[in-house]
Amino acid sequence: MSKRHWLFKSEPTAYSFEDLIKDEVAEWDGVRNYQARNMLRDDVKEGDGVLFYHSNTQPLAVVGTALVVRSGYPDHTAWDVHSEHPDPKSTPGSPIWYMVDLAPDKLFSNPVTRVFMMSNSFLSNMILLKKGTRLSIQPVTKEEFEEVVRMSNSIQ
């Protein structure tokens, strides 16, 4: 199976790329959307590349890349009543939610802003740039991934 590519969104006040660098490896937990859960459970695999996107901030931007270092497994934070996102319907015997582990790859010296991406016609089909798309985890093509990395070497 070939390596896939993803975009993961995170609010930097909740968990930033700098946090990921400090932690070295992090559980990508707390996803409570069924479509995103299905991707984490079934599709996101060890070795896949991730564009790390800072959302709900200014500017909105891809700030670096990460690697999936552990494929999907049950999100135990759903069973912890003291976590930020418990779900009493999820149990160890019947998990509902899944997570993966990420490690930082590259911090961009020039974050690639949403505005800059929108100006690039090559990225016109990128899910992130479509109106109404809110998923916190999205597939990206290898070509889109590589283009965003290339754009990080440009001054905006």
Image (tube, rainbow, N blue to C red):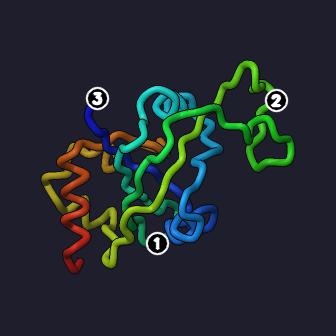
Q: Position of residue 20 (x, y in %)?
A: 54, 64
Q: CA distance from mark 1 to mark 2?
A: 35 Å
- Helix, strand or loop under label 2: loop
Q: Residue at 25% across / 67% down in the picture? A: 116
Amino acid type shown at disc 2: Pro
Q: Which residue is mark 3?
A: 1
Q: Residue furthest top?
A: 94
Badge 1: residue crowd in 10 Å (few <14, some 14–19, many ≥20): few
The residue type indicated by label 3 comes to: Met
Coordinates of residue 36 in the picture (x, y in percent): 50, 35
Sequence-first tag of 3 and 2: 3
Question: Which residue is at a point 34% across and 40% down the rendered structure image?
Answer: 139
Q: Is residue 43 above or below residue 101?
A: above
Q: CA distance from mark 3 to mark 2?
A: 35 Å
Taking the image as shown, residue 101 lies to the left or right of residue 127, namely right
Q: Residue at x 74, y 37 (%)?
A: 78
In screen coordinates, is 86 left or right of 44?
Answer: right
Identify the secondary structure beneath mark 3.
Answer: loop
Q: Position of residue 152 (x, y in %)?
A: 25, 70
The front one of 4 and 121 is: 4
Query: Could you say which is closer to the camera, residue 4 or residue 126?
Result: 4
**Mark before the other along the chain sequence, 1 or 2:** 1
Residue linked to disc 2: 88
Question: Cα distance, mark 3 to mark 1?
Answer: 37 Å
Helix, strand or loop at label 1? It is loop
Q: How many residues crowd mark 2 within 10 Å: few (<14), some (14–19), many (20+)?
A: few
The disc at residue 58 is 1
Which mark sits nearer the N-terminus, 3 or 1?
3
- Dot 3, crowdedness within 10 Å: few (<14), some or many (≥20)? few
Mark nearest the camera among 3 and 2 is 3
Of the residues tagged 3 and 1, which is closer to the observer?
A: 3
